[in-house]
Amino acid sequence: MKSLAELKAIRDRMQSQMNLRDDDDSKNIRVVVGMATCGIASGARPVLNRLAEDVQKENLTNVRVTQTGCIGLCQYEPIVEVYEPGKEKVTYVLMNPEKADEVVEQHLVRGNVLHKYTLNSTNL
Amino acid sequence: MYRSHVLVCAGTGCTSSGSDKIIENFKTEIQKAGLEDEVTVVSTGCHGLCAQGPIVVVYPDAVSYSMVRPEDVPEIVSEHLVKGRVVNRLLYIEDDGESTKALKDTDFYRLQTRVALRNCGVINPEDIDEYIGTGGYEALGKVLTEMTPDQVIETILASGLRGRGGAGFPTGMKWKFASGNRGKVKKYVCCNADEGDPGAFMDRSVLEGDPHVVLEAMAIAGYAIGSDQGYIYVRAEYPIAVQRLKIAIKQAHEYGLLGENIFDTGFNFDIELRLGAGAFVCGEETALMTSIMGKRGEPWPRPPFPAVRGLFQKPTILNNVETWANIPRIILNGPEWFSSIGTEKSKGTKVFAVNGKINNTGLVEVPMGTTLRTIIEDIGGGIPGGKKFKAAQTGGPSGGCIPAEHLDIPIDYDNLISIGSMMGSGGLIVMDEDTCMVDIAKFFLQFTVDESCGKCTPCRIGTKRLYEMLDRITKGQGTLEELDKMEELCHYIKDNALCGLGQTAPNPVLSTLRYFRDEYLAHIVDKKCPAGVCKALLSFKIDPELCRGCTLCARNCPADAIIGKVKEVHQIDQLKCIKCGACMDNCRFGAVHKE
C-alpha cells in the first residue's frame, strides 16, 4: 500500500461489514423478516439474505435487518416489516428476493412505500 | 457478505472459561445449519464484563449473551440464527432482575466512555482489514501527508494527554523533549506493555483486542520525534497478546504500513517485540530499557532522562499501552475533542481494571473525574453479599487505599495524589469489611520485597524490614514504639530509593496508616484483628447455646482440635487449633464464631 486512496478502498470495502456491528441509535430503520417455521418454509431465508446484502451494498448505515418469529399470518409468508420512527409500520407480504430488491431500492433508499406488495393490498 | 456476525470474546478471561471451544462449536453448528454463507463468527478482544464471560454478541440485533457454555451453542444457532428467536435464558441479567438485550443498555456500559477500548470486543484483532474498517491507520496517513512533525507534537500537547502508566507525565512534553536533531541521531520509540501490578489487566486487553492501535500510534510518534525504530516490551505471561502483536506486525508489514517508505512519504518505521521475563521492576522505564538492551533489568538514576539518553544511549520516548491507544483518535478527532472529556488537569478517559470484592469484575473506561462511587456502585454493581465497602486500592503495590469517606471525590491524577493514593496504571481493587487493612499492606509489601531488584539499599533492605515490622503487628507482637519507627522508615525509603518501585513501595503502608490507624492500634494494643483475618489474633469458639452436638465440626477438623461427644456441646482446644475455619464453614447451626 502506497497511498491513502488504497487505505480508503479497504475501509470502504470493510465499512458495510463493520456497520453491521453498530449498536448506536443511528440505526433507526428496522427491517424485520418473519423467520418461524412457516416463514422459512415459504422462502424467508433468501429474502432475509437478499435484504441484508442489498442494505450493505447500498451502504444504508441507518438500516438494521433482523429476524423475528411467527407474525401470525402464515399464509402470507414470507413477511417483511419495516419500522421507521414516526411512521406507521409497513408490512410487505408474499415476498421473494426480487421483491426484496425493489423494497430496498424504492422504500429504503428513496422512501417510497411499495403499496402493491403490502398487506393492505391483499383482500384480508 | 454476511447478514449476521457472531462475536465471541477471545480475551484472556473468556478464553480461560472456554471461549475457544465456543468459537469452534459455533463454526460447526453454523455449518450444520447451512448458514456458513450468511453468518460469520468473529473472535474479538475483551468486552470488559469479564465476570459475566464468556460473552457472545449477535449482530445486527446487538443481542448479548453472557456466561455462555459450549453446550449452549446449538440452541443459539437453531433458535437465534435460524429462527430469529432470542435465547432469553442466556441474556445478561442486571440487578433489577430484568434481562437486558444489548450490552450498551446495561448500567455497566451506559456510564462508560470508550476511547482506548473503542475497538475491543468490536473488531477481530487478527484482521487488519477490520481495524482499517473502523478508521485504522487513517491517523498515520494524516500525519504523514498533511502534518509536520512539530504539528503532531503540538496536537498531542494541546490535547492534554498525560501518561496512563502511572505517573501522569504530559505525553506531548515527553515527545517534545525528544524531538531535537531529527534525522541527525538515531532515536527510539518504546511501548511499555510490562503490566505487572497485581489486579491490572487494561494493557493486556488493549493488546489482545486492538493491537494495531499501538502500532499505528508508535509510528505516529516515530514521525513526530524522528525515529525509525520502535520496541514493544511485553510480558511473556501474556501469550495471547504476544501472539496477536506478532500477527499485527506481520500484517502491517504486508500492507506497507510498517517498514520502509510508508505511504510513499519516505518515512521508515519498524517495530520489534521484546518479551519480559516477569520482573515487576521492568515496568519502570529505565529498568525496561536496560532489559531491552539485553542486560539484567535494573534501573539507572535519572537524569539523564530517556528523552535525552535512553535506549542504547540514544534519545528515547516510552509510553504505556493505554496512552498509545489514545493517540490515533486525538489525531483524527482533534485535540479539542479529547480535552473536552475529563477534568481541568486530567483530560480524556481512564481505563480501570476493577476487581476484588465487586460484582462486575472487569474493564471499565470512564471520563476522568468520575467518582469512585459511580465506578463501584453503578458500573461495578456494588459489593457481593450486601457487605459494606471499606476501601479501594488504586495503583496496586505503588498506590494507596481510598476509604469510604472519599468515595465521592472525582478521580483524576491530582485528586488521587492529594488523598494519598495515585492513579497508577489503573488497577482498582475493592475491599469490603472482611478485609484487614494491615494484612493488605503486608500483602503488597510482600510483593515489593519479592520484586525489588536489589540494586539500591533503601529498597532492598528497607522494604524487607518494613515487611517484618508489619508481620510482627499481624502476629500481635508489634509495639507502639515500632509503629513510629515504621512510619519513619516509610519516609526514608520514599526519599532515598533509586527508582519508582522503591519510592512508591511504602505507599500502601502510609495510606492504610493514614485512614485506618485504628486497625493498626487494635492489632498492637488490643491484640485483636477487627476484620477477623490475622490468624494469630483470633480464636474460634463454639457457642454452647447453639451447638447441637452433631459432630460435623469435629469430623472436619484437620487438627483433631475439637472435643465432644455426639449430642453434647463441643469445644475447641485452642492449643491444637490451627485456625483454618473448617469448623465454622461446616457448622449448620451457626454455632462457631471467631473473635
Image (cartoon, coloured by chain):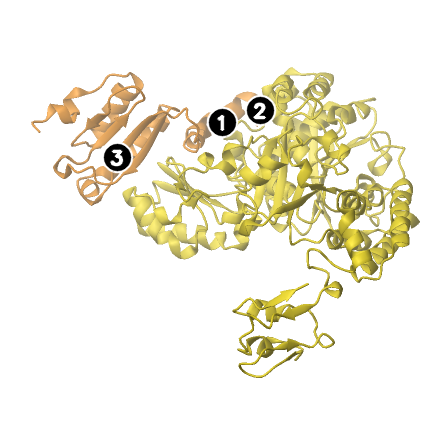
Chain colours: A orange, B yellow
Instruction: Give me the residue at 49% from left, 28% from top.
Output: A10
Label 2 element class: helix
Residue B138, disc = 2
Give, as a three-letter code, the residue at label 3.
Val
Position of residue B391 relative to residue B472, above or below, is above
The residue type indicated by label 2 comes to: Glu
- Asked if disc 2 and disc 1 are in contact, CB closer than 8 Å, the reply is yes
Q: Looking at this view, name the residue that lies furthest to the left.
A: A123
Q: Badge 2 local density, few (<14 within 10 Å), some, or many (20+)? A: many
At label 1, counting other C-alpha atoms closer than 10 Å, the crowd grade (few under 14, some 14-19, many 20 or more) is many
Name the quadrant of the N terminus of chain B: top left
Whole-angstrom CA distance, mark 2 to mark 3, is 37 Å
Residue B32 locus on image (x, y percent): 32, 52
Residue B157 is left or right of residue B146, and the answer is right
Q: Estimate the spatial distance between the alpha carbons at disc 2 and disc 1, rounded to whole Å.
A: 10 Å
The picture places residue B469, in percent across and down from the top left corner, at 85, 56
Circles 2 and 3: CB atoms closer than 8 Å:
no
Mark 2 — on which chain does it sit? B
- Marks 3/1: CA distance? 29 Å
The residue indicated by pointer 3 is A33
Task: Report the chain holding disc 3.
Answer: A
SS class of the residue under badge 3?
strand
Please indicate whether residue A26 sits to the left or right of residue B461 in the image: left
Instruction: Give the quarter of the figure containing the C terminus of chain B.
Output: bottom right
